[in-house]
Image (tube, rainbow, N blue to C red):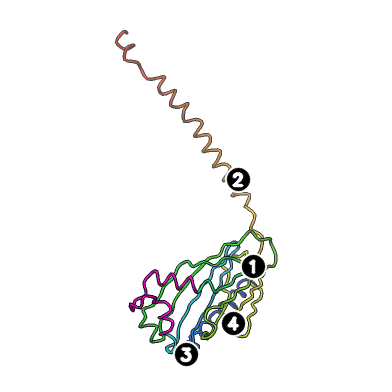
Amino acid sequence: MRSSRASNRVAYLLALTIAIVVSVDVSAHRRDEYLQAARLAIEPAAVQIELDLTPGIAVAEAIIADIDRDRDGLLSSDEQRTYGRLVFSALELEVDGRPLPVELGVFSFPDPEAMRRGEGTIRLRSAATLQPLSVGAHQLLFRNRHHPDRSVYLANALVPESDRVAVIAQRRDGDQRELIISYLLHAAPATSPVVWLLSSLAAVTVLAMLLMGPRRSVRVKARRPVMGELEGS
């Protein structure tokens, strides 16, 4: 079992490495297009989205204009956030046919000059919370509709960090705007009897200390001599 899991991890890492190499090659040669590379990490209770946007030299000025709404040549934090939300409004995410809200989380933007050189990458991150899912097979759908007129797309599933999640298949449409991930959700491991016993003993010990504390205080006060009694003796 461990050997099979290790082999799967190696295979996914190799696939991811190939995807990164391909993305670098695409960004280097498609100067007139907007590279959008999406990576999705599935967890038992959430889906993490990493979206990297790299404009080619020929389209960089148009992308900068989309972001720099006040035309001051700078990309303010508010302008960056507004553009990030615009991008995420064009994303669709579903699990087993149920739509999930995709909201902008962490974001970072390069300097406009870096984008004009074709070297600047916009990085957007999001985490969508899942409703409790049953153990077994599930399907995630990701679709990117942002700037279809000038973009090339990449979409991949990352290796799950949780042993409870196993990606079993990935299907993409021709231009990789749409990715369907089939995965299995395994049951959560049962609590070890030893851990349960130690936790119970710790709880009993704390309870006993709380109950014994006031009694000890009363006994100490009862043994303390009273000044009036000492003077009368």
Q: Could you say whether the residue bearing mark 1 is in a helix, strand or loop?
A: strand
Instruction: Please report whichever mark, 4 or 3, sits nearer to the chain's N-terminal start.
Output: 3
Residue located beneath label 1 in the image: 95
Mark 2–mark 3 Cα distance, whole angstroms, equals 64 Å
**Quadrant including the C terminus:** top left
For this orientation, the residue located farthest to the left is: 231
Residue located beneath label 2 in the image: 197
1 and 2 marks in contact (CB < 8 Å): no
Q: Could you say whether the residue bearing mark 2 is in a helix, strand or loop?
A: helix
Circle 3: is it few (<14), some (14-19), or many (20+) Cα within 10 Å?
Answer: some
Q: Nearer the viewer, mark 1 or mark 2?
A: 1
State whether residue 29 is above or below residue 63.
below
State whether residue 185 is above or below residue 69.
above
Q: Could you say whether the residue bearing mark 4 is in a helix, strand or loop?
A: loop
**Amino acid at dot 4:** Gln
Residue located beneath label 3 in the image: 32
For the record, the magenta segment spans 61-86
**What residue appears at the point 48 percent right and 77 percent down from the top-left corner?**
52
Mark 1–mark 4 Cα distance, whole angstroms, equals 18 Å
**What residue appears at the point 40 percent right and 83 percent down from the top-left corner?**
115
* Overall secondary structure of the magenta section: helix
**Amino acid at dot 3:** Asp
State whether residue 157 is above or below residue 135.
below
